[in-house]
Amino acid sequence: MSGAFQAETRRNRENVDSVSLASSASLRQTLPWKPVAAYCSAGTHSIPRPNPMLIIPLLAAVLAAAPVDGAHASHPPIALSAAVDDTLRGTVADAAGRPIAGARVTILEYQRGTRTRRDGSFLVGGLPPGPCTVRVTAPGYAPLTRRVERVGDVGALALAERAFELEPVTVTAARSPQVAAGPLPSSTLGPERLRREHSVSLARTLATLPGVRALTTGEQVGKPVIRGLFGARVAVLADGLRLEDYSWSDEDAPSVDARLAERVEVVRGPASLLYGSDAVGGVVNVIPEPLPDAQGAAFARGGVETYFASGNLEGGLVARAEGAAASLGWRATVIGRLGQDLHTPGGEIPNTGFGAVNGELAVGASRPWGTLALRYQRYGGEFKLLEADGPVVGPAADRLGGVAALQAEEEEGGPERKLSDDRVQLSGNFPLPGVRIEARAQLQRHVLQEVADELPLTVDAAGAESVQFDLLLNTFTADVLAHLAPAGFGQATLGVSGLAQRNDSRGPELLVPDASIRSGGAFAVWQNDFGPLRLMAGARVDHRALTARDVPSLDLVADDDRDWTAVSWNAGGVLGVGGGLALTASVGRSWRAPTLFELYANGPRIGEARYDVGDPALEQERGLEIDGGVRWTGAAARAEVSVFRNAIDDFIVTAPTDVFIGGLRVFRTRQADALLRGVEAQAEARVLAPLTLRGVFDYVRGTERGTGDDLALIPPARGRVEAEYRAGGMPLLGHGYLTAAMDLVAKQTHAAEDELAPAGYALLELGAGTERRAAGRTLRIDLQVRNVLDTAYRDFLDRYKEFALSPGRSIVLRVATGI
């Protein structure tokens, strides 16, 4: 880095992003939520609305009650000689010994964290006295991870300058912090990328990572696709706890807002060993920022972020407040998003707007006996859906003498998805002699409802809005883990997990029966280093029981009880061969139980213009994946290549048939052995002091073993190249960056039968941003132009591809201060 850049960086970090919030009234003035709340209350039929007014008074009350001693930047330097047994102290500096202010310090085992002060010092008190893993990050520097054997004064932690963000620590891939990369391929989306890329869809936020795509329904609904697998084959976690939803539905998606995360970890490949059923393709873990630490003095601070996107006239606001006093830390966040109809090079797509209000409240305590945290999160809104031309069946069609075509022509017409997801999480860490106990529990209430236009009684009468289906899923999950590190034996984690779930089907269309699920599992994971060789191995056993209630309309004339027992395992290693080069290999067994829809579906889905028929005789899926790779890390560059082969026995396929019921094509569920093979590559290099080049490529091929028939919805080959220029010391602009990226997507030449395969395309993306001090706070401005050339294209994984173009040019402006 240039001297000017270093000087500017030091000036930018002289204060921490904190500001005192003097009263609840000042906070309420920063949260103009009425337009969003009004939008979400529209419509005849409704589910519990994401009402921000339930969150804001709580946020304000906490602020009013919290002692406020001003910003961290005004605190006196930490006296390192005063260290006590329950306090972690130290300083963060660069390679030349210059202090780094505003660096983020996290104690991974206890999800505690703080930011360094202007002199680079930090303090985290009330910690258990045993060993812990400390992670330090700062923009422009490589993250540092250090294993501390005992809490106390850790001295000076030096960060090396890096032009790219290297994430050496993952928690998701081993259920415990890994100081060095393990054998399972993984990627991390860090704080800066999340701030630039976040949207209402988690899948779209992650879509630039290697091996990851998004199966989308417009801009607002998306499922993560990992190595060609999605839905019930990808486990999505919120801070390590499973998110349960109706993953079989095209209109449902992970109910978590990426803006609530500090980072998102993605594990590519089988992870049933760690998370049980459904983790056949991989895992996505949305990890929140640790609650703040008082650093010896109580404080409260807040920040606001707003953004606007021209492509669908989308606007959003993020408001966050946090603070700490003594051993307590807390945070409150509210996120509002409102989008209109999507624009494409071919024109506007009707009935594709949305409104959403998401947020969280969290409070935690840390004492020498351990830590406790209580968190409430909500994700909800109304998402309008463009309906394919399709027949209308049932009483309304009969009144008009048969089948009629229905298509939305205005924003007020057509179906909508109404979603409400509420979660309460309780987590704790308790060190005991020779072992650390980690316990987590979650209650989740997930409501999915589709509302559509009803045909009138007569041709001249006005239509009405009616509920098509109404689903309620209540889930309780719990995990208890024991982390051990016996001398000479490496690290081991023993765990048990349990799940109790109930599904209630309401509304005129019963897509699945009422049902209850109970499952439990036990596992053990071990990892150890033998010189340059790191080995990891583990095994797990799961039992899952299902009871489905009789529903004659689904041809289920009596209660149906069934259960599955499965064993999963993983083994792998990383071998360092010198010069920053490492070889990786792993093999893993995974499994998945069939969903309610795959087992019992027997009826129409009007929005998809199809009639689904399940199969109660389905068996569990069983996968065996072999993965190998090469990783290289140098002083100014890194690269990684992975190849994989995933053979899945009894792969569940829903395929079209030549049969029609009521004018709807019948889609029947069946099983066949499948094979997925692919390659992923990524590279990053600083070619000049301010210029970094990046590249990503991935390809996967999915077929049925035996017949060689292609699997549906397997993404085509993709490449992405990106250049980023960073500079500091610019007049008025401060620390800034410029980016240019090109996405190159090939045509899918191995599409399934009757599957539309659009032509390949190239999309240009430009970006710029700056960070500077303004009025005593850090101000960040990001500008992004997507699809700069307004290219007309159709994404292979877009559900609208058969009758609409994918999004056109969109200019996205984000402004943030104090977040």
Image (spheres, helix red, strand yellow):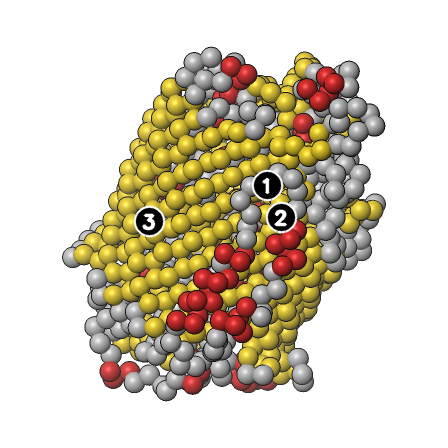
Q: Earlier in the sequence, mark 1 or mark 3?
A: 1
Residue depicted at x 65% and y 39%: 44
Which residue is disc 3 drawn over?
A: 440
Q: Cα distance, mark 1 to mark 3?
A: 32 Å
Please state, as top left, top right, bottom left or bottom right, where the N terminus lies in the image: bottom right
- 546 or 761: which is nearer to us? 546
In the figure, is residue 725 to the left or right of 524?
A: right
Which residue is disc 2 drawn over?
A: 41
Image: 704 above or below 119: above
Q: Earlier in the sequence, mark 3 or mark 2?
A: 2
| Spot occupied by residue 536 in the image (x, y as percentages of width and height) | 33, 46
Report if the CB atoms under discs 1 and 3 are less than 8 Å apart.
no
Which residue is disc 1 drawn over?
A: 46
| Spot occupied by residue 584 in the image (x, y as percentages of width and height) | 43, 47
- Disc 3 marks which amino acid? Arg
Which mark's residue is nearer the viewer, 3 or 2? 2
- Give the SS element for disc 3: strand
| Spot occupied by residue 704 in the image (x, y as percentages of width and height) | 57, 24
